[in-house]
Image: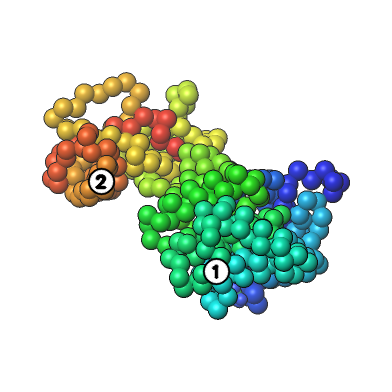
Amino acid sequence: MTQERDPAFVRFAGIEKKYGRVVAVKPMDLEIPEGSLVTLLGPSGCGKTTLLRMLAGLETPTQGDIYIRGKRINDTPIHKRNLGMIFQNYALFPHKTIFENIAFGLKYRGVSKTDMQKKAEKALETVRLPGVGNRMPSQLSGGQQQRIALARAIVIEPDVLLMDEPLSALDENLREDMRREIDNLQQQLGVTTIFVTHDQREALSMSDKVVVMKDGFIQQQGTPEEVYNNSANHFVADFLGHSNFMVAVVGEKKSPFLEARLADNTLCLVSPAEDFAAGAKAEIVIRAQKMTLGYKTDFTRQAEMNYFFGKIVDRSYMGGEVSYFVELAQGQVLHVINFVKRAPYRRGDEVYIQVDPFHCRLLAP
Ligand SMILES: Nc1ncnc2c1ncn2[C@@H]1O[C@H](COP(=O)(O)OP(=O)(O)OP(=O)(O)O)[C@@H](O)[C@H]1O
Ligand SMILES: [Mg+2]
């Protein structure tokens, strides 16, 4: 591939980072398309920050290459990489005014005083905080300070915007507002953005592409719908949303489905995520939201549906939805989430669970 033709705006090629014996990022390839918002999602310690820091030039890769617009940047110093960065703790300079905070990155780019003023004002308007330039950071709320950090990152018109858990210090409601604001702003500016989070809702709600990581390794990457609906493995299915797992043995083909036998001999119809041989051990994954409950006394079987029978052992009201825990005769407890309207069940009620084979995905164990 010639460098000019590289379709990725940012490309990590065989990138690896070791700290002594700790492998923070295992050799991986990753492409960030131009103008997209890509999230790195994964549990604590999986290497998200390390990957960002290597792109930013704050860490040196142990091996591998990083390209921006097809140009290898491994040896490009930090200040020449033209990246906007926002970190978890707002990290505004407390003794500088908001204006000085925003203009900080412009100083080193040889921008004139009047242009600085104009650009900073425009950045403040973009983050919807016009006119606060003369205030000190302490005179703004946490959410406002984070918007200033955003203004400071975009004022330099970066090639790539890097955000490392920028919302984690904010309370839930504010987070949601900010999430939408960052999403809108990113689309408006069209700036290529890498957003780090360990919050799956954050990742699913704002990304063009989600990169799910674990132990320094990419588990799966794809659109939010792909990684959620077609999770590649147990870890991804478990990390995104609420999943139930049932051990099964693969049976015969019942096109378009496959039969799978559970430990208690129940036969289910499932949708295989890959090719399986009859007799192979596998695992059925079912999302908590994809199952519906009914009173056992009202049960009537419909063709091509899967059923489980059990007893409600716990319920929790979540406003709009109710979370149920249903213990099956064989002892496994399934998590079912139903809308309040169709969910009048109480602890101790005998129920059936109905689930479409389409929503029973069969994965390798
Ligand atoms: N400077 C360092 N020296 C030694 N080990 C490090 C260093 N920085 C990170 N690590 C290790 O590398 C691994 C990846 O760390 P990293 O900070 O990239 O994780 P993360 O995905 O950002 O986690 P979190 O969600 O907690 O921020 C961890 O095991 C961490 O302990
Ligand atoms: Mg981190």
Name the residue beneath numbered marker 1.
134
Q: Position of residue 180 (x, y in %)?
A: 48, 48
Q: Position of residue 267 (x, y in %)?
A: 34, 32
Mark 2 and mark 1 lie on one chain; the one further toward the N terminus is: 1
Evaluate if marks 2 and 1 touch, with contact meaning CB atoms under 8 Å apart.
no
Name the residue rendered at 52%, 42% in the picture: 224
Name the residue rendered at 76%, 43% in the picture: 7
Name the residue beneath numbered marker 2.
319
Q: What amino acid is at disc 2?
A: Gly
Disc sitting over residue 218 in the figure = none
Q: Is residue 306 left or right of residue 60?
A: left
Q: Nearer the viewer, residue 328 or 315?
A: 315
Q: Is residue 45 left or right of residue 61?
A: left
Q: How is the image coloured?
A: rainbow
Q: Quadrant of ligand 1?
A: bottom right
Q: Is residue 17 left or right of residue 250?
A: right
Q: Residue furthest top?
A: 303
